Amino acid sequence: MLTLEKVDVFYGAIQALSEVSLQVNEGEIVTMIGANGAGKSTTIRSISGLVRPRSGKIYFEGADITRLPPHKLVMRGICQSPEGRRIFANLTILENLQLGGYIHRKKHAQLKEDIERVYHLFPRLRERSSQLAGTLSGGEQQMLAIGRALMARPRLLMLDEPSLGLAPFLVQQIFHIIREINQQGVTILLVEQNAFQALRLASRGYVLETGRVVLEDSADNLLQNEEVKKAYLGE
């Protein structure tokens, strides 16, 4: 479904990604793990068109999408729930969701159906539908960020640090919902510092260090890898 071939990304003179290659097959949950500054978020931003690779290619469902702008990528079925949530704090939960479904704004019945789907996944959002998003707790804001991304009906959903700053019981809840979203047919690329939880959820994983992919394997094998254990699993 998604293929990156030797993608290089620079911020000015600083190289953030160096020949990053990875693949995400339809129906998978694939995770990228690594320390802060390893290039995980930059990889996602390059896929979603927010940063443009200096070299390399990105393909989605067989088409070259390397130079496409973000709104075109959303229309093709690629959506991102960004690190830090980036919700619209001065709008209500419902208004945030409606903006997430903007590309389908003329399909009123579909929008209503999609909002119901989000509320089914996140009942707490239904309870607070008219509440300003900026007044929500961190966990509720994360639910809203994921729900807003789902409103565009993605085929590939990219999640950037969904558990960041959340209490342990909320982390478990978020990861349970991610699995449920995947079981509903959405392919997921997950960036997550909680490497243990991410690898338990994913089928495959990539380890990034200083902008390079240094290891690729099944999630089970990465969980048993001694170097991964020492560096990322606290063992």
Image (spheres, helix red, strand yellow):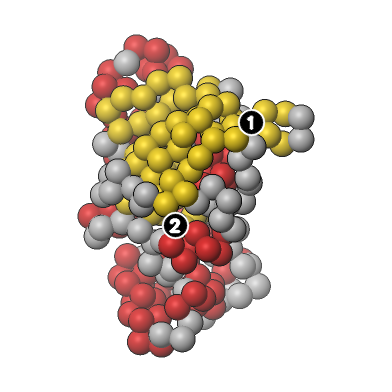
Q: Residue at x 32, y 51 (%)?
A: 187
Q: Amino acid at mark 2?
A: Ile
Residue behind mark 2: 78
Q: Position of residue 21 (x, y in %)?
A: 45, 31
The answer to whether residue 48 is above or below residue 29 is below
Q: Is residue 140 left or right of residue 89?
A: left
Label 2: state its secondary structure: strand
Q: In the image, what residue type sits under mark 1? A: Ala
Q: Residues within 10 Å of mark 2 (few under 14, many from 20)?
A: many
Residue 53 place in picture, x, y as percent:
61, 40
Q: Position of residue 203 (x, y in %)?
A: 26, 36
Q: Which residue is mark 1?
A: 16
Seen at 47% across and 24% down, the residue is: 213
Label 2 or label 1, whichever comes before in sequence order: 1
Q: Quadrant of residue 147?
A: bottom left
- Is disc 2 in contact with disc 1, using a CB cutoff of under 8 Å? no
Left or right: 176, with 4 as reference point: left
